Amino acid sequence: AAACAASLLSRVRVQGAACEGSIPRTSPLQPASIRGEGAPSIWLKELEEGGGDRTSQGMRVGVQYIVRLLGDGTVIEDTRRSGWGSRAYAQPFVFTLGDLEDEATLRVLHAAVLDMRVGGSRRIRTCLMDPQFGYKTMPEVRDEQWRPRTLERDWLIDVEVTLVAINNGERKWLSLPWQR
């Protein structure tokens, strides 16, 4: 599984030219493509580069992110407004970069955070249930009257992620703004 993750993540690159049938070069989101037979595309935009340390595969990272449906902007997840499990309300979501078997982590976050600097932000676009990058199970979304909303597998989502902390394998975290 680790070799598969390394192979998958090593092929994610932001490209200057648009992929076949995707968004034009003038678009604010540039495609990052996984090449191969039947391979999906994701679109990535660097919003802010950040000035801290750079991430690499295997690091524990702390991020804040929001997932929205493209089109109507419905919020599917927002770490700044939620908390579950061992993560307290509004605390950053922590995961191991490259561990694609982790069921709790939205897989597109691995591609978004790879090689990012602390303090940086990126927007990444993919399909809701993309086999490589999307959710593994359909998320539950409710409307204003708290009724379940039906989502389609191929709907596009925008994920805006900010890297707030990294752990380089030592016992201490680097750059923990919420503990200052």
Image (cartoon, rainbow, N blue to C red):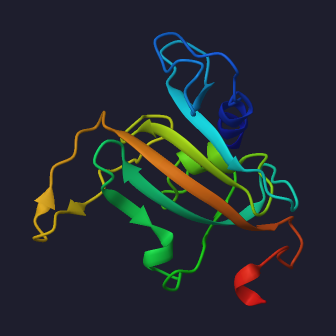
Quarter containing the C terminus? bottom right
Image-based side of 92 in relation to 149, left or right:
right
Q: Residue at x 82, y 74 (%)?
A: 175
Compared with 121, 114 (above or below) is above
In the image, taking residue 56 as reference, residue 37 lies left or right, namely: left
Is residue 151 in view? yes
Q: Please give the name of the residue rendered at 68% of the width and 50% of the height, measured from the top-left corner.
A: 113
Residue 152 in picture, x, y percent from top left = 23, 39
- Can residue 99 be seen from the camera position used here? no
Q: Where does the N terminus fall, quadrant-wise?
A: top right
Q: Quadrant of residue 33?
A: top right
Please, is residue 93 above or below residue 31 in the view? Answer: below
Residue 150: image location, x then y, percent: 15, 49
Residue 24: horizontal and vertical position, in percent?
53, 18
Q: Vertically, is 165 above or below 105?
A: below
State the image coordinates of residue 153 (x, y, percent, origin top left): 28, 37
Q: Nearer the viewer, residue 14 or 132?
A: 14
